[in-house]
């Protein structure tokens, strides 16, 4: 059992606690950190861990073997470096950072310290996405030419913390909270991105935004891609890989649709699983010296590189090559 500290006890921190505490047989939280300490007292009492207001207190707690960050995005890179310097594995909620250089700095700090770095891309653990990766790697689809993805949900219409509305924390609008999950899937399935061209349209700014993002991709391997994200729209998830022998489409958490040459279509449905619990169990396995964490450091940096290019494309209304970052 890995004894961990969780830093940040807001909306998402509480979701992590609900998924993990008392349910995982591999990781538990013994220490929590929150700047809003008075508001966090009931949370600490409910989940039975020590509470403090500073990261340093958690790092000095001799029980703490690993640290989980559920803090504002702009803080992630510096906090990862600090945790790594203390010799503790660190799990960071997405986005890992807002700039590729900061992501690389965080990854390098963990490599130098010899500690595991995990990132919170829980859609990796959806049964539909696991099946999509398997069939894309099998060669059944032939030569893969194109990938499309869309992720929308209503979370941005519900204000969990005022910091989430800050441009400095959410420079990519819907990319930051939702679209980055598609970016992670794209990098995992298609490799590093070479160039992006973004269209961002807003009809109502924060709070309670109404906006859309559309992104065209060119991958280093020659694939093309297309991504869409709509904030304040009902939940929808789709990642679709197109090859010259067939295509495979992950729809939501539990369904895969495979289309073959000749018109044959196969629909596969899978049992649901708790993806948050699965990703923290995977992190605990990596910390314990078992299987490596399934998102590689190179993929972490490549995803943030694509994210930064998209934010630049939004600002400049032009295509952005990642080689210029």
Image: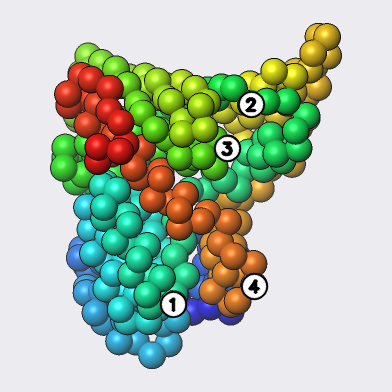
Determine the residue positioned at 64% across, 72% down: 290
Check the picture and name the quadrant holding the C terminus. top left
In the picture shown, does residue 18 fall above or below 249?
A: below
Q: Is residue 277 visible?
A: no
In screen coordinates, is 112 left or right of 16? left
- Point out the tag, 4 or 3, that comes first from the N-terminus: 3
Q: Is residue 80 visible?
A: yes
**Local crowd at mark 2 within 10 Å, few (<14), some, or many (≥20)?**
many
In screen coordinates, is 17 left or right of 311? right
Residue 114's disc number: 1
- Point out the tag, 3 or 2, that comes first from the N-terminus: 2
- The local secondary structure at tag 4 comes to loop
In the picture shown, does residue 76 fall above or below 81?
A: above
- The local secondary structure at tag 3 comes to helix
- Point out the tag, 1 or 2, that comes first from the N-terminus: 1
Question: Residue 72: x percent and y percent?
Answer: 25, 53
**Local crowd at mark 1 within 10 Å, few (<14), some, or many (≥20)?**
some
**Local crowd at mark 3 within 10 Å, few (<14), some, or many (≥20)?**
some
Write down the residue under mark 2: 144
The quarter of the picture where residue 41 lies is: bottom left
Write down the residue under mark 4: 290
* Disc 4 versus disc 3: nearer the observer: 3
* Disc 3 versus disc 2: nearer the observer: 2
How much space separates mark 3 and mark 2, taking CA atoms? 10 Å
């Amino acid at each position: 059992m890995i004894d961990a500290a969780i830093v940040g006890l807001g909306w998402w921190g509480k979701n992590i606690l609900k998924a993990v505490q008392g349910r995982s047989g591999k990781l538990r939280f013994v220490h929590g950190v929150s700047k809003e300490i008075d508001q966090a007292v009931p949370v600490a009492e409910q989940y039975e861990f020590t509470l403090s207001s500073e990261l340093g207190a958690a790092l000095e707690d001799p029980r703490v073997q690993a640290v989980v960050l559920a803090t504002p995005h702009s803080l992630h890179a510096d906090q990862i470096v600090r945790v790594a310097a203390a010799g503790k594995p660190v799990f960071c909620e997405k986005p890992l950072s807002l700039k590729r250089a900061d992501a690389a700095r965080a990854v390098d700090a963990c490599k130098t310290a010899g500690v595991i770095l995990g990132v919170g891309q829980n859609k990796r653990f959806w049964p539909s996405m696991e099946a999509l990766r398997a069939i894309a790697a099998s060669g059944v689809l032939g030569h893969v030419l194109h990938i499309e993805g869309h992720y929308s949900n209503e979370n941005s219409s519900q204000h969990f913390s005022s910091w989430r509305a800050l441009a400095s924390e959410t420079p990519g609008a819907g990319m930051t909270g939702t679209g980055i999950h598609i970016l992670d899937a794209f990098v995992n399935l298609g490799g590093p991105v070479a160039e992006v061209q973004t269209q961002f349209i807003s009809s109502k700014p924060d709070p309670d935004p109404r906006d859309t993002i559309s992104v065209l991709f060119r991958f280093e391997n020659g694939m093309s891609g297309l991504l869409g994200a709509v904030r304040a729209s009902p939940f929808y998830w789709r990642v679709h890989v197109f090859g010259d022998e067939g295509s495979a489409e992950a729809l939501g958490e539990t369904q895969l649709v495979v289309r073959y040459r000749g018109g044959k279509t196969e629909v596969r449905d899978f049992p649901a699983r708790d993806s948050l619990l699965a990703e923290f169990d995977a992190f605990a396995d990596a910390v314990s010296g078992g299987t490596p964490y399934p998102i590689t450091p190179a993929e972490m940096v490549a995803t943030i590189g694509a994210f930064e290019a998209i934010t630049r494309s939004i600002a400049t209304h032009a295509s952005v090559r990642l080689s210029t970052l």
